[in-house]
Amino acid sequence: MTSKIKSISKSGTRPDKLRFNSLEKWLEWQERLHFTAIELGLERCRRVANNMGLLKPAYNVISVAGTNGKGSSVTMLDKILRNADYKVGRYTSPHLLRYNERICINGVEVSDSELCESFDRIDRARGEISLTYFEFGTLTALDLFRQHNVDLAILEVGLGGRLDAVNVLDADVALITSIDIDHQQWLGDNRESIAREKAGILRNKAPAICSDANPPQSLLDCANALDTPLSVLGRDYNLTMGHSDWSWETDNISLEKLPRPMQFCDFQLQNAAGVLMVLEKIKNDYPVSIENIKDGLGSFRFNGRMQFIPGRIPKILDVAHNSESVRELVKNISKIPCLGQTHLIVGMLKDKDHPEVFKVLNNIADSWNIITLTEERGSDAKTLISELNSLGINENVVEYTNVGEALDQLDELSMAGDRIVVTGSFLTVGAALGHLNQESS
């Protein structure tokens, strides 16, 4: 996204017809509309939402914040509630392959034409108000959920919580997943300050769930100050892991022999436990059956999260990009037998803690294949390699221009029994998926 470019739209020059007829053109324009790619704050988005009558929706809202596990939790909730025949709107970010992935109605991505028409309604309603790319997308989700008359909307917070555009709506139920150090530039450099920002989605007396078993005190304090009934994993509800299944319980409910959501991913059980607590809180209005739950958990798959792609040289794709998520990735990968070598393809954004991530990944790395992310926030390969070298990692480190080049070269050089792991960023994994899909088409 391009920063420090002044707003390029005035209400007096707004054309009567659609500003653009293609999704690509709309998105390119949105990237340049606001002077910076990220600017936290609710005023602009709230004013436009108010102009469009979006602030008091007919549907119920579940907002999901946290450092890791947000997208997985949203997707599990969506799947289980749709199994029970509710009409669900799902909003997530960022996307891997297509912008349309961000907004789904009943599990189906909205079309290019629906997006363009919604962008136009927002463009007309905003007047001279400048919006960021993410704010435009959030308003579009709310607009399309109203257009489709959904029963519930499940909204993934983009960054933080308190000042994120999603927070223009009051959550009927809030879910806060694991909390770790990430986005320090905007949220602070410790778990207490970060949790305080995440707690911004809590509302007075509205139920909230935390699936982090060790929540920072600041989150608990915010809930107490708001008189928010907060259910915390390990205190108010629990999970017990078995070899092939797991169980979940509260003081008065016990669910046994639940299917594991994704093999080898213990972390997903933490997400699933929080999801079940959300369902418990809304059961009077949106009841689901144990069959709905078991089917939703058992069939749960999520692109870019421990995604296994078979072949002569199998690939594992995971968007892990901070220390906590990378630790989980390494733990999960270590459970999968490998007769040969593990080749890492890594590309990262500039604002991530590269050395901490590299230290953890080094536990599984036989070779490092470092790529440049050319987007504005992306880091170049030479910088990442220099940071690897400073950690004493000098051998089997190769620089590549892009993910496709790295995948092609490793496919050619790898031996039977080897595997390739692509990680470090949504952008890295998205590029890998795009390249692999193109190869197979």
Image (spheres, rainbow, N blue to C red):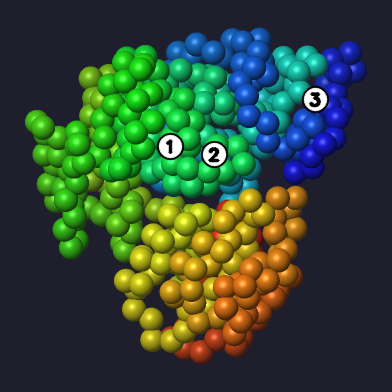
Q: Distance between the residues labelled 3 and 1?
A: 45 Å
- Cβ–Cβ below 8 Å for labels 1 and 2? yes
Q: Nearer the viewer, mark 3 or mark 2?
A: 2
Mark toward the start of the polypeptide (3 vs 2)? 3
Hey, what amino acid is under mark 1?
A: Glu
Q: Horizontal and vertical percent for residue 138?
A: 59, 28
The foreground one among 92 and 219 is 219
Mark earlier in primary sequence (3, 1): 3
Nearest the camera: 150 or 400?
400
Say what amino acid the circle numbered 2 marks.
Answer: Gly
Q: Label 2's element? A: loop
Q: Mark 2 points at which residue?
A: 188
Q: Name the residue under label 1.
A: 192
Packing grade of label 2 (10 A; few <14, some 14-19, many >=20) is: some
- Name the residue located 39 percent from the left edge and 31 percent from the top edge: 218
Element assignment for label 1: helix
